[in-house]
Amino acid sequence: MSEPPEKPRKLRADSQRNREQLLAAAKAAFAASGAEMPLEDIARAAGVGIGTLYRHFPSREALLAAVYRREVEQLAASAESLLAQRPAGEALEAWLHLLVDYMATKRVIAPALQASAGEGAEAYASGGAVVTEAMNRLLEAAIDARAVRADIGSQDLYRAVIGMSFGYDQPDWEASARRLISVLMAGLRS
């Protein structure tokens, strides 16, 4: 009989804090300078040594994958918290703005993740379904609340979001995407 898999040990508070600081610093560094940003610079920006970075993330790919997973998790979790704090239509609109932030990070990290064959590729492949599920949850809540038209399906919203992401590698993309959210929400309202 095989033994059950070991549960990962819970990190000490200082270790968890270091990990979070590294992820935040890596996200900012990758967004500003690209996925090839020197890891030493990321460690310095996080206020830790390079050894601490490598203890948490043994490779660049592991760090990129962790940043991406964190972004996906935060975006997905924001759907429920926004629904708890705001009317459903407002929650959907606010979440779409968070989606633009996510896309801005993804634009830098995605090529490196797709080019990898291991942990990075796996993280990238699993992220889309999680994001789509959160978007669908928000859309359903907005339809149920009669905040958006009932004839809008999840595929309709998905197509609009895909269109919104067009040209995301261009300098003015983010401002354009945010304007399109306003146009989209005006068309979605019942």
Image (cartoon, grey):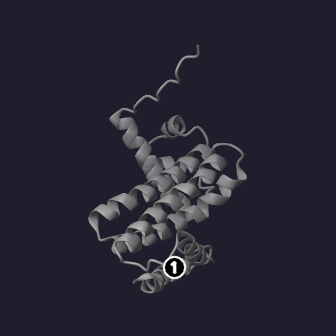
Which residue is pictured at 59% across the width and 43% down the height? 62
Task: Determine which residue is flagged by label 1.
Answer: 177
Percent x, y for residue 89? 36, 74
User: Which quadrant of the rendered structure holds the N terminus?
Assistant: top right
Which residue is pictured at 44% across the width and 77% down the height? 150
Evaluate whether residue 34 shows in this view. Answer: no
Percent x, y for residue 101? 47, 67
Which residue is pictured at 49% across the width and 78% down the height? 151
User: Which quadrant of the rendered structure holds the C terminus?
Assistant: bottom left
Determine crowd level at label 1: few under 14, some 14-19, many 20+ residues with C-alpha closer than 10 A.
many
When the figure is inspected, residue 97 is found, relative to residue 80, above or below; the finding is below
Percent x, y for residue 127? 56, 54
Judging from the image, what secondary structure is the residue with disc 1 in?
helix
Please state which amino acid type lies under the numbered disc 1: Ala
As drawn, the residue found furthest toward the top would be 1
Quadrant location of residue 97? bottom left
Quadrant location of residue 142? bottom left
When the figure is inspected, residue 163 is found, relative to residue 53, above or below; the finding is below
- Give the number of callouts: 1
When the figure is inspected, residue 97 is found, relative to residue 29, above or below; the finding is below
Evaluate whether residue 89 shows in this view. Answer: yes
Percent x, y for residue 49? 47, 40
Task: Specify whether 58 is left or right of 185.
Answer: right
Along the line of sight, which residue is nearer the eye, 162 or 103?
162
Which residue is pictured at 60% across the width and 77% down the height? 163
Along the line of sight, which residue is nearer the eye, 58 or 9?
9
